[in-house]
Image (cartoon, rainbow, N blue to C red):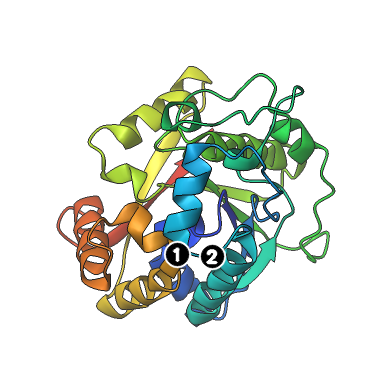
C-alpha cells in the first residue's frame, strides 16, 4: 500500500498527482489520508479569514462536505482511495478560552500555537487503514514547505507513525503550491537538518499523460482554484502546474521526493 498523508482535502493530489496516477495505473493500492476533513463547527464569531475563505469557496457555512466530495472525485480520477479523518482545519480550531487560534495569515503560516492540541490528538488517534500487520506500506509525508501549521502538524504525525511502524518505508513530498516560492523548499529542509535527519532527493520524471491526469484531478477542487490561481481558471492552473513540474525536473516534467538516508 502507498499511503499519502495529506494535511488538507487537496494537498496530496496537488503535490503528488502524477505519482499517484502512475502507482494506481501499475496496480498499486493507493490511499490518500486527509487529516483535516472534519466538519466545520458553527462559528458565531468567525474571523474575517473564515468569512473570506467560505465566500470564495462557495460551499456554504460548512464547506467541508463539499470539499470531501471534491477530494473523492479527484482521487477516483487518479485511481486512488480516500480516508477522511475527523480533525479540524486550523481556521476552525479554538484555544482553551474559546478564541480561534489562527485568525490571520501570519498565524496560519507561523509557529504552532501552544494551545493547539491537534498534534497530541493525532498522536493518540487509533489509526486503521485496513492493512494486514505484515503489509508492505510506503508512507508519504509532507516536507512542510510553506510552514503552514497544518502541514507542520501532519509532518510531525508522519514522523511519529514512522517511529511506531518501523517496517514502513517513508518518503517526503514537496508541498505544492507553496514550493513555487524561491527558497521555500530549502527552508523546509532545514527542519530536518536541525533535527539531525539526513534526506536525499529523488526526482520522478513523469509522462504527459500523467501530468494531464494530475491537472484534471486538481480541477476537481473547484472551490480551491481561486485560492491558488488568481485568474481562477483551468488554463492558469495547468500552466502553473506544468511550470512548477518543469522546474522540479530541470526542464523535464517531474515531481520530487526525499528519502531518509540513515
Q: Mark 2 or mark 1, which is nearer the start of the sequence? A: 2
Quarter of the picture holding the C terminus: top right
Front of the two marks 1 and 2: 2
Residue sitting at the far front: 44
Q: Is residue 51 left or right of residue 63?
A: left
Q: Residue 188's x, y, as percent?
A: 41, 31
Q: Which quarter of the rendering shows the N terminus?
A: bottom right
**Image quarter for residue 118?**
top right
Q: Is residue 77 above or below residue 259?
A: below
- Please, is residue 235 above or below residue 173 in the view? below
Would residue 128 be found to the left or right of residue 227 on screen?
right
Which residue is under mark 2?
Answer: 59
- Residue annotated with mark 1: 223
Q: Of residues 245 and 166, which is closer to you in this image?
A: 245
Separation of residues labelled 1 and 2 (CA atoms): 7 Å
Q: Name the disc covering residue 259, or none.
A: none
The residue lying furthest to the left in this view is 251
* Quadrant in the picture for residue 231: bottom left
State the residue at coordinates (59%, 40%): 46
Q: Secondary structure at mark 1?
A: helix
Please say if the residues under marks 1 and 2 sit with CB atoms less than 8 Å apart.
Answer: yes
Mark 2: give few (<14), some (14-19) or many (20+) Cα within 10 Å.
some
Q: Secondary structure at mark 2?
A: loop
Q: Residue visible at 43% across and 32% down?
A: 105
Q: Decide if residue 156 is in sight here.
A: yes
Q: Is 11 positioned to the left or the right of 136 in the image?
A: left
Q: Is residue 202 above or below residue 240?
A: above
Amino acid at each position: 500500500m502507498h499511503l499519502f498523508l495529506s494535511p488538507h482535502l487537496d494537498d496530496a493530489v496537488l503535490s503528488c498527482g502524477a505519482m499517484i496516477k502512475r502507482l494506481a495505473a501499475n496496480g498499486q493500492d493507493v490511499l490518500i489520508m486527509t487529516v483535516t476533513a472534519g466538519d466545520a463547527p458553527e462559528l458565531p464569531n468567525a474571523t474575517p479569514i473564515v468569512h473570506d475563505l467560505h465566500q470564495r469557496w462557495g460551499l456554504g457555512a460548512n464547506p467541508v462536505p463539499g470539499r470531501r466530495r471534491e477530494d473523492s472525485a479527484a482521487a477516483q480520477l487518479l485511481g486512488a482511495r480516500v480516508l477522511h479523518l475527523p480533525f479540524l482545519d486550523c481556521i476552525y480550531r479554538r484555544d482553551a478560552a474559546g478564541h480561534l487560534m489562527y485568525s490571520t495569515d501570519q498565524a496560519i503560516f507561523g509557529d504552532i500555537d501552544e494551545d493547539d492540541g491537534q498534534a497530541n490528538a493525532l498522536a493518540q488517534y487509533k489509526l486503521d487503514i485496513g492493512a494486514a500487520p505484515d503489509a508492505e506500506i510506503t508512507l508519504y509525508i509532507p516536507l512542510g514547505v510553506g510552514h503552514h501549521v497544518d502541514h507542520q502538524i501532519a509532518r510531525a504525525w508522519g514522523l511519529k507513525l514512522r517511529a511506531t511502524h518501523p517496517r514502513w518505508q517513508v518518503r517526503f513530498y514537496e508541498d505544492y503550491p507553496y514550493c513555487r516560492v524561491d527558497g521555500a523548499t530549502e527552508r523546509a529542509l532545514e527542519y530536518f537538518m536541525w533535527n539531525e535527519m539526513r534526506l536525499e532527493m529523488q526526482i520522478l520524471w513523469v509522462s504527459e499523460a500523467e501530468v494531464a491526469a494530475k491537472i484534471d484531478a486538481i480541477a476537481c477542487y473547484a472551490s480551491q482554484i481561486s485560492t491558488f490561481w488568481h485568474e481562477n481558471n483551468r488554463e492558469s492552473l495547468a500552466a502553473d502546474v506544468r511550470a512548477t513540474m518543469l522546474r522540479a525536473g530541470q526542464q523535464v516534467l517531474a515531481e520530487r521526493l526525499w528519502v531518509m538516508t540513515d
